[in-house]
Amino acid sequence: MNDTTVVVTGASTGIGAAVARTFGRAGATVVACARDRDALDEVVADIEADGGTATGLRADVRDEFDMERLMETAARDGGAIDVLVANAAITHGTPGEMPMADEAYTVFDDTLRTNVRGVFTAVKEALPHMPDDARILVPSGSVARTAKPGMGAYAVSKAAAEGLARQFAADCSQTVGIVDPGVVNTDRTGGQGRDPEDAAEMVRWAAAEADADSLDGKVVELAAWKKATR
């Protein structure tokens, strides 16, 4: 992926950190952001130690001015933005223990502001810097489509983020796809699931190898990746 510029939001931990490292190893110029500057610096240092090129910015996806600054930095450092992975997301509480009726208004608002508006701001600010053949990827999960007890505002936000991705796909010349890597071992899953590095490889495949027509406005699940790469 030489001569490719990739922006990753929420890149300090979990899937986002693994995605940033994976693209760095693949030769892309990585521009990553997160709110935790120290953790983000570690990810950037890892990429550079492996011979990659990376820039880290402390930025909040809830703030459109932060996203504007992030995308302008990416375009200045690496040229046009070829791939955006709108990964940043939060959950307030333990998955399976967040019944909808018990969600505080502040929790509901912050979850949707980060997980939905944050995707909107990242994509909106990236588009002016993206060529027509660029790709935008929105990580998601099955809770967006199949309700499970105790997933609260997080599940609602993922369903909304998928709808947002589909609408951008309908309105934009760029390919906009939803990537569902299944359950991944992060802070949100309590140590359960697949290795984040494995999920990151699926994201890299979606960015560089997946058929654009099969990706645009659609959900690509784990089985499709395994079938395409076996």
Image (spheres, rainbow, N blue to C red):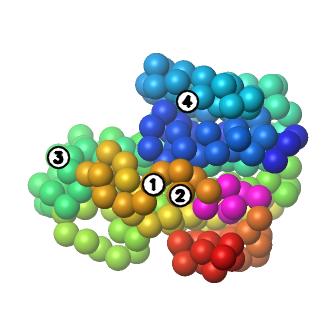
Q: Is residue 203 magenta?
A: yes
Viewer-side residue, 178 vs 206: 206
Find the distance from the CA under tag 3 to the CA under tag 2: 31 Å
> Could you tell me if residue 124 is visible in this image?
no
Say which amino acid is labelled 3. Answer: Ala
Q: Which residue is mark 3?
A: 104
Find the distance from the CA under tag 1 to the CA under tag 3: 32 Å
Q: Between residues 116 and 50, which one lies in front from this camera angle? A: 50
Instruction: Give x and y (percent) for residue 172.
Output: 75, 60
> Relative to residue 189, is residue 230 depicted above or below?
below
Residue 61: % across, % down: 51, 36
Assess whether mark 3 and mark 4 are in contact (beta carbons under 8 angstroms): no
Task: Give the secondary structure at mark 2.
Answer: helix
Label 2 environment density (alpha carbons within 10 Å; few <14, some 14–19, many ≥20): many
Image quarter in which the C terminus is found = bottom right
Instruction: Tell me the element at label 3.
Output: loop
Amino acid bearing label 2: Ala
Q: Which residue is mark 1?
A: 195
- At horizontal 57% and vertical 53% (from top left) the residue drawn is 200
| Contact? badges 1 and 2 (CB < 8 Å) | yes
Determine crowd level at label 4: few under 14, some 14-19, many 20+ residues with C-alpha closer than 10 A: many
Picture coordinates of residue 161, whole percent (x, y): 49, 59
Task: Give the residue at mark 2.
Answer: 199
What amino acid type should be assigned to the residue bearing mark 1? Asp
Region in magenta: 202-208
Name the mark on residue 43: 4
Compared across the picture, whether 131 is left or right of 139 comes to right
Question: Up-down: is 93 above or below 147?
Answer: above
Provide residue 143's location: percent of width, then percent of height.
Answer: 36, 68
Q: What main secondary structure does the magenta stretch of the protein show?
A: helix
Q: Are marks 3 and 2 in contact (CB under 8 Å)?
A: no
* Disc marking residue 164: none
